[in-house]
Amino acid sequence: MRAQTPLLARYAEGLFWLARYVERVENVGRLVDVTQIFESPGREAEAWYALVRINADEATYAERYGAPDPDSVKRFYLLDTDNPTSAPASIERARLNARQLRPLISTEMWKHLNVFHREVMATRPDELEGDRLSRLCARLKEGVQTYAGITEGTFYRDQGWYFLNLGRLIERADQTTRLLDIKYHLLLPAGAEERRVTEMSQWGALLRGAAGYHAFRRVTSATFTPEDVVGFMLGDTSFPRSILLCVRQMEWHLSQLRARFGLRGTGAPLERIEELRAGLLSHPVERILQAGLHEFLDWVQRQLMAIAAEIGTAFFRDWRPLADQDQVQDQSAA
Amino acid sequence: MSDPFQSYDPGPFFCEVTASRPGDAGAAAVLRSRLAAIGLDALRARAAAAENELINLGITFTVYSDAAAIDRILPFDCIPRILTAAEWRHLDAGVRQRVAAINLFLHDVYHDRKIVKDGLVPGDLIFGNANYRPEMEGFPVPHGTYVHICGIDIVRDQEGTFRVLEDNARTPSGVSYVIENRHLMLRAFPDLMAGMRLLPVDEYGRRLRAAMTEIAPEGVDDPNIVLLSPGIYNSAYFEHVFLAREMGVPLVEGGDLFVEDDRVFMRTTGGPQPVHTIYRRIGDDFLDPTVFRSESLLGVPGIIGAWRKGNVALANAVGTGVADDKAIYAYMPRIIRYYLGEDPILENVETHICREKEGLDRTLAHLDELVVKPVGESGGYGITIGPRATAAQLEAARAALVADPANWISQPVIGLSVGPTLTETGIRPRHLDLRPFAITGKDTWVLPGGLSRVAMKEGSLIVNSSQGGGSKDTWVLADGS
């Protein structure tokens, strides 16, 4: 047996992005599904346009479709390969990365992605209609979940596995912020009681969209408040899609890259992660809601971007020539 | 039960399954009865499922035409071609002999040039060849091996005689299909194979890795080996992936490598890692922009310098294209006798060299009977098959010949052997060739069998994948089976 085999920087980057793009496909399915539940008679356009806003896609959307319109928004995210945040564009990029990574990923991962890619690319406009839309979303989610299961069971866990998970975790945390942000963009009725009921049902739908509803019910009292939901999505330590859990796992993966593989350069991204974790733990949910959930989510998104950038600098693009490497070694020896 | 072979008629051609051969021991008869037991409909359904599996697995190559790149699978025919143990011994010995002669020839060409001085091969044919690399002159390669991976295209004429059609000594491709085809057969047609004693094809990756270890720079016992590919848009990318995985080495692109102080490194998450042996699937021209084509983005600047310093091994060596040129091919029987003092085990196809007046005259006089091929081209491009060509095509070939005779050779049309092949109209004869693959480090090893390429169109003689050819599993019967 050989000692730890080195991982090409290009492969590490490819794995990171493969995971992010695949995770996006699942989240398109979740977001569309949730939005469908939020759709209320007479307000369809607003409900669907929230999707465009949480993805910050207003400009691209306006350029391609003009005015907000439910069918256009669905097409934009489920059929439009020119929209980089759509399901087909994401699976296309995922497959392109996977193609680069074929020497590394398991044959079964590649085969599933290849077949799933073909299915997503072949989505027909009539599958966006009526009850078929929900089934389409389910297929998107299940396609990614199957991939995740295959990966869990077949992908060799050396360095590459950690980079794959880092990409998945960052993307998942980012998507949770967007799912939460939907709520910010939704309109509420004027009457107090009607408003309370609608609001609770919206929060419930959001939890269901994140596959967290039942776990949430288990850990909270019968009557729950918006604070409870936001606290659960941001800071629960056991919910797989909570931001805090994703952040802790990122931390663990980076530490392992250092401990198991002796990779330098984990310092800067770890510091960024610590910053995000501190921000999550030090702000009580009540304060976050008072100061503005949308603004807080914005900050989380920026932090996630900064973490991704630090990982990129440390491992992907910073292919240090020998001279620099020696310098680093000298310094650490001194 | 109707026999799907009932109306099978190979005509004047040698059939690779039905021709009676000593040592066949009934394997062909068993195969035929098993095919009959499955029946045409089930065969078709299973063949379609098998091809679908190839698509799902992305076992594809890329065809470039009209500026569009299309991923295609290599059409797969489920009826194998059978080689007897005796036939294989003959082929194996012939391929090894040929590889030995090619390596000796290359060493001579880049050192003492004795074969030219002795007047056996005209010097300008070698030194005026575009694939001749002056950078190689006087440069020693480990074990005298220039061609580590060699693919030799072999056809069989109407009498059943094997003849070499072409040597591929640069970056021959296709070996991945040999192994994938066998795996596909085992999955989709286990009942055809049950109990057949066949030589295995699984050893290729291990042998290749061993050879790459043998040629590593001196003093490196556990070399870092990589496979250098032009990347995902190359037509043979699947094969590069396949071979990297079979060897268990990284598949790298030019951008993953860099040279410092005449040493090659790959860029990894943990910083630069040294590289000792490179199986490169990039042509000479693109390998090092500081030495060859300066605009190449595929290669690695400085890699030739590192190689010449002996810090990294390249497989195949640079400059091997001078040996597999179609013009040199005509001299191969002489080359074998000259270096080895033996008669060629595998014969050539008779070849007219149009750069010589006699060859040109002969070719022009019999244009409608001969196959005219450009030298230095691969992939079946630019070939005119006289008996099949239209008057206009013949005129175009004539004009090209007269304009630049040295660019052409011609050969008689060989009635290529056929193999029973599943078609829309039943099991029909289709023409085949065979490309065995030889690996050479210290010694030469030949993968049992090789790639059997089949022209899927009725009567067609062109088996190249870029021209719509397919492939079959190649069964080499074990001794005494």
Image (cartoon, grey):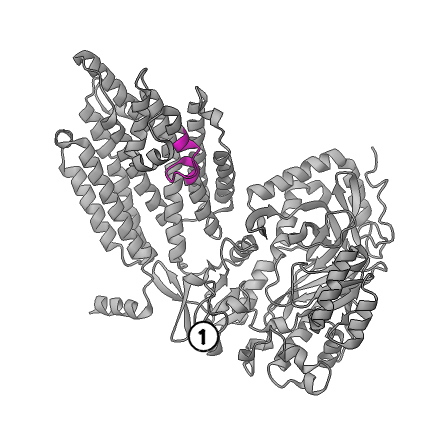
- The residue under label 1 is which amino acid type? Ala
Q: Quadrant of the N terminus of chain B?
A: top right
Tell me the residue that label 1 is attached to.
B306
**Above or below A283: residue A164:** below
- In this view, the residue in front, A160 or A226, is A226
Residue B277, x across and y down, in percent: 49, 68
- Kindly identify the residue that appears in the image at 63 percent across and 52 percent down: B177
Q: Is residue B165 visible?
A: no
Query: Left of B201 or right of it: where is B84?
Result: right
At 23% across and 50% down in the image, what residue appears?
A270
Q: Residue at x 59, y 64 (%)?
A: B171
Residue B468 position (above or below residue B225): above
Locate residue B246 relative to residue B182 in the image: left or right. left
Residue A77 colored magenta? yes
Q: Position of residue B444 (x, y in %)?
A: 64, 69
Residue B302 lies, in percent from the top left, at 43, 72
Question: For the magenta stretch, what is the residue range?
Answer: A75-89
Q: Residues within 10 Å of mark 1 (few under 14, many from 20)?
A: some
> Closest to the observer: A75 or B443?
A75
Q: Is residue A143 above or below residue B175?
A: above
- Whether residue A240 appears in magenta in the rendering, the answer is no
